[in-house]
């Protein structure tokens, strides 16, 4: 469980409307297409849900992502960034992890043509 003080610190970074620990929403992030196939191979009960994140955050900038990562390091939390959400590798794999959904970061501000492969 995520402590209230940690949740409040994360909320201050992204704003009230861009963080949640509502179980219904957390379950949508825990649902992973193909998860049941992995569990069949490992002799676990087949189901479509992976690990539920402690919270989901939607940052709007690289500065917010950096602040989230710093806070995770301070509070011994893991994090997993998510862009498309496709595939079982998109969800968190630890019971002490938050999900960082990058969908609000939807603008390309700069392209480094020296390191970009076209």
Image (tube, helix red, strand yellow):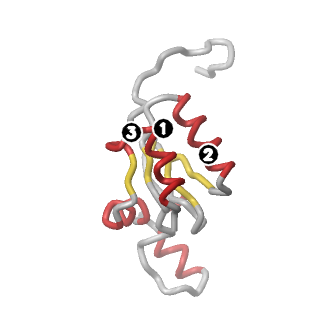
Q: Nearer the viewer, residue 65 or 76?
A: 76
Q: Residue at x 54, y 60 (%)?
A: 92
Q: Nearer the viewer, residue 37 or 108?
A: 108
Residue 25, given in percent of the width and then of the height, sits at 33, 60
Characterize the local packing of mark 1: few (<14), some (14-19) or many (20 or more) Cα atoms within 10 angstroms: many
**What residue is shown with label 2?**
71
Characterize the local packing of mark 3: few (<14), some (14-19) or many (20 or more) Cα atoms within 10 angstroms: some
Mark 3 and mark 2: Cα distance apart in space? 15 Å
Q: Which mark is residue 15?
A: 3
Would residue 50 appear left or right of 118 to someone viewing this image? left
Characterize the local packing of mark 2: few (<14), some (14-19) or many (20 or more) Cα atoms within 10 angstroms: some
Q: Residue at x 39, y 48 (%)?
A: 19
**What residue is shown with label 1?**
13
- Indicate the secondary structure of the residue bearing disc 3: loop
C-beta proximity under 8 Å, tags 3 and 1: yes
Residue 62, given in percent of the width and then of the height, sits at 54, 29
Mark 3 and mark 1: Cα distance apart in space? 6 Å
- Indicate the secondary structure of the residue bearing disc 1: helix
Q: Quick check: 24 above or below 46?
A: above
Q: Assign the C terminus to one quadrant of the image.
A: top right
C-beta proximity under 8 Å, tags 1 and 2: yes
Mark 1 and mark 2: Cα distance apart in space? 10 Å
């Amino acid at each position: 469980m995520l402590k209230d003080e940690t949740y409040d610190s994360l909320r201050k970074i992204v704003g009230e409307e861009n963080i949640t620990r509502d179980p219904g929403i957390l379950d949508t992030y825990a649902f992973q297409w193909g998860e049941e196939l992995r569990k069949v191979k490992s002799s676990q009960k087949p189901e479509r849900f992976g690990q539920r994140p402690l919270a989901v955050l939607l940052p709007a900038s690289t500065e917010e992502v950096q602040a989230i990562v710093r806070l995770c390091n301070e509070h011994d939390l893991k994090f997993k960034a998510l862009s498309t959400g496709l595939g079982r590798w998109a969800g968190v794999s630890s019971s002490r992890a938050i999900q960082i959904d990058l969908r609000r970061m939807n603008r390309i501000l700069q392209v480094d043509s020296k390191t970009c492969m076209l």
